[in-house]
Amino acid sequence: MQINQMTPVELKQELENQTPLFLLDVREPIEFRYAKIEGSVLIPLNQLSERLDELDKAQHVVVICHHGMRSLQAANYLVHYGFEQVSNLIGGVDAWSLQCDNQVPRY
């Protein structure tokens, strides 16, 4: 199954339209504390396998990391375990900061 690639601008539009999304941030806690997209939930990539039961397979999950590589890995993992609505945020929180919300710090 192909992973949907979502741009920061598309994500912003979905959030403004109040589309029900679960924003899954797979970075490390120190990164999350420094910069995050409002409403996102932290489950670090190395904890994802043991915390899968915290996620709803029926929900559209948008996976977020710093630049989009860890999130793509996590998105593929979710699809492998039966999640059907999974999107990877292209460029991650860094691109979000550049394109949508410059109040989110870059690092």
Image: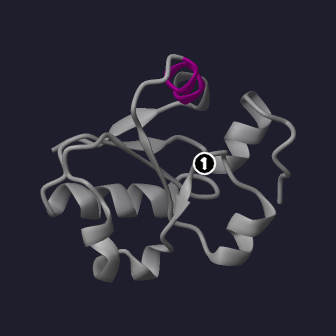
Residue beneath label 1, please?
92
In the rendered image, residue 12 lying in the magenta stretch gets the answer yes
Residue 74 lies, in percent from the top left, at 37, 63
Residue 79 lies, in percent from the top left, at 20, 54
What amino acid is at disc 1? Gly
Numbered-mark total:
1
Please provide the residue range marked out in magenta. 11-16
Specify the principal SS of the magenta part: helix
Residue 9 lies, in percent from the top left, at 60, 23
- Taking the spot 26% from the left edge, 64% from the top edge, the residue there is 77
Color scheme of the displayed model: one colour
- Of residue 79 and residue 34, the one placed in the foreground of this image is 34
> Residue 53's image quarter?
bottom left
Q: Is residue 52 above or below residue 65?
A: below
Q: Is residue 1 above or below residue 32?
A: above
Q: Label 1, secondary structure: give it.
A: helix
- Taking the spot 87% from the left edge, 40% from the top edge, the residue there is 103
In the rendered image, residue 4 lying in the magenta stretch gets the answer no
Q: Is residue 78 left or right of residue 26?
A: left
> Residue 88's image quarter?
top left
Residue 65 lies, in percent from the top left, at 57, 58
